[in-house]
Amino acid sequence: MKEYTYVGLDVHKKVVAYCVKTADGSIVHEGKIPSTRQALCQWAENLEKPWEGGMEATLFTGWIYDTLLPYAAELKVAHPYMLRAIFAAKKKSDKLDARKIADALRADLFPRCHMAPPEIRDLRRVMRHRDFLVGASVKMKNKTSGLLMEAGVEYNKKQLHGKRYFQDLLARMEDVPESVVDMLRTTNDSMLVFEHNQRKLLDALKKHSLLRERIERLMSIPGVGEVTALTWALEIDDPQRFSSVKKAVSYCGLCSGQNQTGGKTFRGPISKQRNKHLQKIIIETAKLAPTWNPQLAHEHKKALDRGANRNEATIAVARKLVAYLLCVDKNNARFELKICT
């Protein structure tokens, strides 16, 4: 039986630096290859099998991972934050980074992160693009308000973005430069386009065969809507990878950092090591969910009664919400509401 070789890959937009090492740390060969599918396939075919590869998670890791996976005995992707300790050296280069990744692999010290299947990653990309469109729409709304305030135009904030009201507002404006009117039309048209496209993407995701039943189960939790359910399903992927609620809460960034030294423990603010997409949507949901969910309302009140401020109470609700989502998702069962007395 042949021994494994360990391949460290330092991936970049134009080139991929690689280093192939044996189990004892000897370098078999190293170099750089273009970041194209054809070049990667040709290079992988010539590698002596079996080999185990590793790379850092970056913007373009996904397609490189999918291209090389059929050729490798095992291919791993590392959490970039955890690799900082490995690469915190005075001298740093693509060649040295590839060597260190190979060393981490052969020493079994590689900080592996979860790699979702291609289908889930494609849908996740769509959902994140939808979030981008929502943000762009909000910017256009804010720009519209800003232009009106600059021009000294009085308007009804609640009705401003209604189609009929906006057209009537443009028609009755006086002493406003034509350039401002043109910019108002442009920002409003852009806002409408962004709103239409984000709604279209959201409707398509809800009806997708991979997600439809799962989303329905998650939405059985009172206070959980389609956006929260879709974000949870696509960002979590496989709920079985979390062995406890605490790990899921940590992944969502709903716990503080801990620094323990000399018998003393220091707690910091909410950790920045988190899935920022999940953290944002779950906290926003936690602000509104107690209105529809008696159990979450009870959790919010309990936090306030013990002296927590409103932000801390919202975090407590968010943690309980994660527990509900994880339970429903793991058990493939609809949520059963129990009224608190």
Image (cartoon, grey):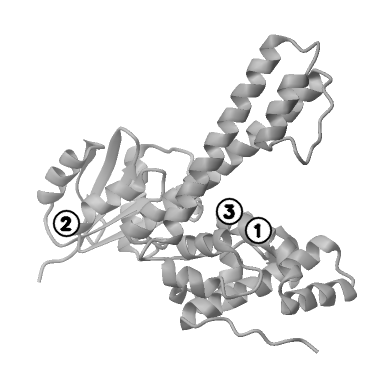
- Would you name the residue on which mark 1 appears? 271
Whether residue 312 sits left or right of residue 318 in the image: it is: right
**Residue 238 seen from this side:** no
- Would you name the residue on which mark 3 appears? 276
Location of residue 224 in the rendering, given as x and y in whole percent from the top left corner: 61, 67
- Would you name the residue on which mark 2 appears? 71
Relative to 163, is 123 above or below?
Answer: below
Location of residue 168 in the rendering, given as x and y in whole percent from the top left corner: 72, 27
Q: Secondary structure at mark 3?
A: helix
Q: CA distance from mark 1 to mark 2?
A: 37 Å
Q: Earlier in the sequence, mark 2 or mark 3?
A: 2
Q: CA distance from mark 2 to mark 3?
A: 33 Å
Tag 2: residue type? Tyr
Asked if disc 1 and disc 3 are in contact, CB closer than 8 Å, the reply is no
Q: Earlier in the sequence, mark 1 or mark 3?
A: 1
Image quarter of the C terminus:
bottom right
Q: Secondary structure at mark 2?
A: helix
Tag 1: residue type? Ser
Packing grade of label 3 (10 A; few <14, some 14-19, many >=20) is some
Instruction: Please tell me which residue is depicted at 48% across the width and 79% down the height of the picture.
Output: 330
Q: Earlier in the sequence, mark 1 or mark 2?
A: 2
The numbered mark at residue 138 is none
Packing grade of label 2 (10 A; few <14, some 14-19, many >=20) is some
